[in-house]
Image: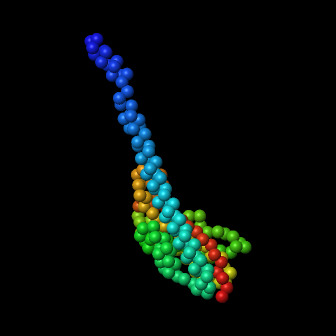
Amino acid sequence: MQRVGNFLANWRQREDGNATIEFAIVFPAMIGMLLAGAELGMVSLRHAMLERAMDLTVRDIRLGTGDAPQHDQIKTTICARASFIEDCADNLRLEMVRVDPRNWSGIGERPDCTDRSEEAKPVRNFDNQAQANDMMILRACAKITPIFPTTGLGKNLTKDAAGQFSLVSMSAFVQEPE
């Protein structure tokens, strides 16, 4: 019995497994942070590309005085410029609203987005028949699938039934007179 007691006492005092214990505790947290950082980087990149595509497209609309581009033309232009949004033609929805800056009512709080879990909806609220000096607001909503949907940031994003989250970009412009 004395030998078993000595063996257990020596075994408790040994420090051979300390690095393994630390690794087992710290490694999952580090991997979680790494995955969340990668997800945040991709979300930021996609949002920046959508914002840039919207800005360039709205600039083209502003400079093309008298030209009233249609929904499909604007959507195609934005998708061509937003290269990091996968399946852009199916995942992007546009909304254009004419607003009166002197009697501001704004636009709806919730953007009009696609949802793969629902039936396809027709274009809603797209008014491109602006007169000279009318203020227009163009809002785009792109649906994105997270890279790591079960960990870190991808797990905590608000997603629809199809597992996608929304990226929204908005831009305002005044229709220039001819």
Q: Quadrant of the N terminus?
A: top left
For the question of whether residue 61 can be seen, the reply is yes
Looking at the picture, tell me which residue is in the foreground, 92 or 8: 8
Q: Is residue 131 above or below residue 8?
A: below
Q: Quadrant of the C terminus?
A: bottom right
> In percent of the image, x 41 and y 70: which residue is there?
87
Toward which corner of the image does residue 89 lie, by quadrant?
A: bottom left
Toward which corner of the image does residue 6 lie, by quadrant?
A: top left
> In percent of the image, x 30 and y 18: which residue is there?
7
User: Is residue 96 shown left or right of residue 46?
Assistant: right
Q: Is residue 98 above or below residue 162?
A: below
> In percent of the image, x 58 and y 76: which residue is there?
58
> In percent of the image, x 70 and y 73: which residue is there?
101
Query: Where in the figure is residue 137, as x and y percent of width and height?
Result: 61, 73
Looking at the picture, tell me which residue is in the foreground, 11 or 69: 11
Query: Where in the figure is residue 23, as x and y percent of width and height?
Result: 39, 38
Query: Where in the figure is residue 111, as x and y percent of width and height?
Result: 54, 66
Looking at the picture, tell me which residue is in the foreground, 11 or 118: 11
Q: Is residue 13 above or below residue 103?
A: above
Name the outermost residue toward the right: 102
For the question of whether residue 122 can be seen, the reply is no
